[in-house]
Amino acid sequence: MKVVGTNLPGVLLIEPRIISDARGCFFESFNADRYEAAGIAGPFVQDNVSRSKRGVLRGLHFQRPHAQRKLVSVLAGEVFDAAVDVRVESPTFGKWTGWVLSAANGRQLYIPEGFAHGFLTLSAEAVFSYKCSEYYRPEAEWAVRWDDADVGIEWPTRALALSARDRDAPSLAAIARTLLTSQPATGGVAVDTT
């Protein structure tokens, strides 16, 4: 696998080594030793799967307290995946990174604590998977508005289906700074472990 740093320190793009032949393909989607060597520390305690139709945008979500590290991927279809730095003391506070993840490219995105996360379904349907380092706690979940002008995510389309909670989420500036994480990103170096 190849691990590539992004414009946000600690957020990593993982590109697996895909073995293909006439029957289909095979790749390793997780190996604790390899991921730890790449700076992606475990343990992960909860796996989630969501299924979404084209144009569904989920996010931008984070937990405070009980911050989560996430390792996300697509099992079927294609999404545009985004992470936003919500650590108020970070030099990249309010900055974002976005990547197309699909079942075909096998890419994963590692998102450390202190980042909000969301994705937009680009294909007719997508099955999205994410490993979390902390259990989901609804009382600790926060959302940043998906189209916050100060963040400026360049979503591939504006024809979106959103939950009421995501549609009505506040801007990053409106969220009380005491609620936002301020710890540094953990781990993460660019490596090739093939």
Image: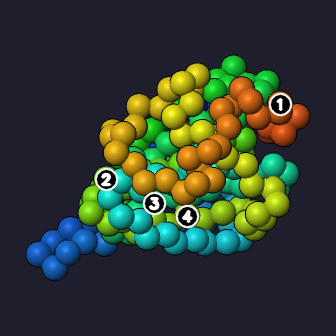
Say whether disc 3 or disc 1 marks the residue closer to the N-terminus: 3
| Cα distance in 3D space between marks 2 and 1 | 33 Å
Q: Residues within 10 Å of mark 4 (few under 14, many from 20)?
A: some
Q: Position of residue 102 (x, y in %)?
A: 33, 57
| Cα distance in 3D space between marks 2 and 3 | 14 Å
Q: Residue at x 79, y 24 (%)?
A: 89
Q: Find residue 133 and report its image quarter.
A: bottom right
On screen, 190 above or below 122? Answer: above
- Give the foreground label among 2 and 3: 2
| Cα distance in 3D space between marks 2 and 4 | 18 Å
| Cα distance in 3D space between marks 4 and 1 | 27 Å
Secondary structure at badge 1 equals helix
On screen, 72 above or below 80? Answer: below
Say whether disc 2 or disc 1 marks the residue closer to the N-terminus: 2
Q: Label 2 amino acid?
A: Leu
Q: Label 1 amino acid?
A: Arg
Observer able to see residue 29:
no
Q: Which residue is mark 2?
A: 122
Q: Label 3 amino acid?
A: Ser
Are discs 2 and 3 less than 8 Å apart at CB? no
What mark, if any, has residue 73 been given in the picture? 3
Q: Position of residue 178 (x, y in %)?
A: 88, 34
Q: Position of residue 148 (x, y in %)?
A: 57, 30
Q: Which residue is mark 1?
A: 177
What mark, if any, has residue 130 been given in the picture? 4
- In the image, taking residue 187 as reference, residue 51 lies left or right, namely left
